[in-house]
Every structure is written in C-alpha cells, then in structure tokens.
Image (cartoon, grey):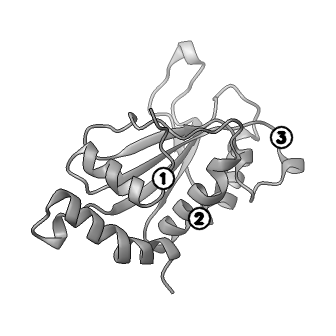
Amino acid sequence: MKARLYKKYTDEVVPALKAKHNFKNIHQIPKFVKIVVNMGVSASNEKGAIEDAAKDLSQLTGRKPVISKSKKDVANFKLRKNQPIGCRVTLRGDTMFEFFDRLVAVSLPRIRDFRGLSPRKFDGRGNYTFGVPDQTIFPEIELEKIKRQQGMDITIVTTAATDEQARDLLKFMGFPFAEK
C-alpha cells in the first residue's frame, strides 16, 4: 500500500504545481528523489558514540546506517585516516514518504518554540537541507536510553529545476516554512 503523502502528491500537489508553473509535460513537475539523514559524531568522543548514533538513526529511519569514515589525517582535529566520524541513511520510495510524513506531522512540531523552518536554505538546485539540534524530537527515541544529545542534518533532494519550484513542492506537501 502506498504512503499517505504519496497519494496526496499524486492527487493534489501535481495538479496544483502544473497549474501554478504552467508545465506542459507531466515529467517537468518536481518530485522527491530521496531524503538523506546524516549524523556527524565528534571523533574525540568516547568509543561508543558512533554505535549509539547508528542505533538511534536506525530507530528513526528503519534502515541500517552507513558508517562514514575520514579520508585523511587532520592533526588539528585529532583525526586519523579511516576513523569513523558519522553515519548516514538514504531513504527512497515509500520509506521516504513515510519518514517525511512523520517528520512534518509529529517530529518538527515537538521542537521547543517552533515557528517553522527557514525558506532560505535551498542550495540553488532545488534541494533543501536543514539541521535538527536534538534527536529527542522523534517519538521513536526513548529518553531514558539516551547517553548523549546528538543532532542531525536532513537533506530533501528533489527534481525541481529552481528553488522556487522546490519551495512550492514542499509547501504543497505541508512542509512548515517560517513566515516573514
């Protein structure tokens, strides 16, 4: 069964975007490609930091994260080559829509004093990246089992040609942008 937001995308968002931007072909309409969730962990932390971050990330996404390792030595950061420095998960298809639905409907409103996310964090190619300061905004994480506060970066990759088209896509999908 398809995700609830995918049905909303096909039934409501596609016609609205086609009308607003005067697309001639249905393949010009922007859509989600993937969502990448990344947790960077300081290399100087204790040994279990990477494993804890990977466990939390797998609880949030339902997928096993890939451990990112450093590519070269950097003495100023006390970093050695092939040392684990973070973990990431790439979501596509139904799991991407399910994660986006949980993020927008449940997790983001749980941020203290939340007034929306900045509409200026687009990269110029229609992709949106924002940071979440704490993993405890997700209801899947049990507060009693957390050893350290860990933030994450979430990137929403779209096929939009411009930032304006991507902003409209996210707005029609219910993404909470801050009003000016």
Label placed on residue 83? none
The residue sitting at 29% across, 70% down in the picture is 14
Look at the image and tell me in which quarter the C terminus lies.
Answer: top left
What residue does disc 2 label?
63
Seen from the viewer's position, the closer of residues 115 and 166 is: 115
Amino acid type at image mark 3: Lys
Q: Residue furthest top?
A: 76
Return the residue at label 3.
147
* Identity of the residue drawn at 38% across and 33% down: 120
Is residue 106 at all visible to an observer of this figure?
A: yes
Q: Secondary structure at mark 1?
A: loop
Q: Verify CB contact (< 8 Å) between mark 1 and mark 3.
A: no
Query: Residue 136: x, y in percent?
Result: 74, 46
Local secondary structure at mark 3: loop
Viewer-proximal residue among 3 and 116:
116
Task: Point out residue 145 in the picture as x, y percentages from the top left corner.
Answer: 86, 50
Q: Which residue is mark 1?
A: 175
Q: Nearer the viewer, residue 163 or 57?
A: 163
Horizontal side of residue 119 vs 23, given as left or right: right
Marks 2,3: beta carbons within 8 A: no
Q: Position of residue 78 (x, y in %)?
A: 60, 19
Q: Residues within 10 Å of mark 1 (few under 14, many from 20)?
A: some
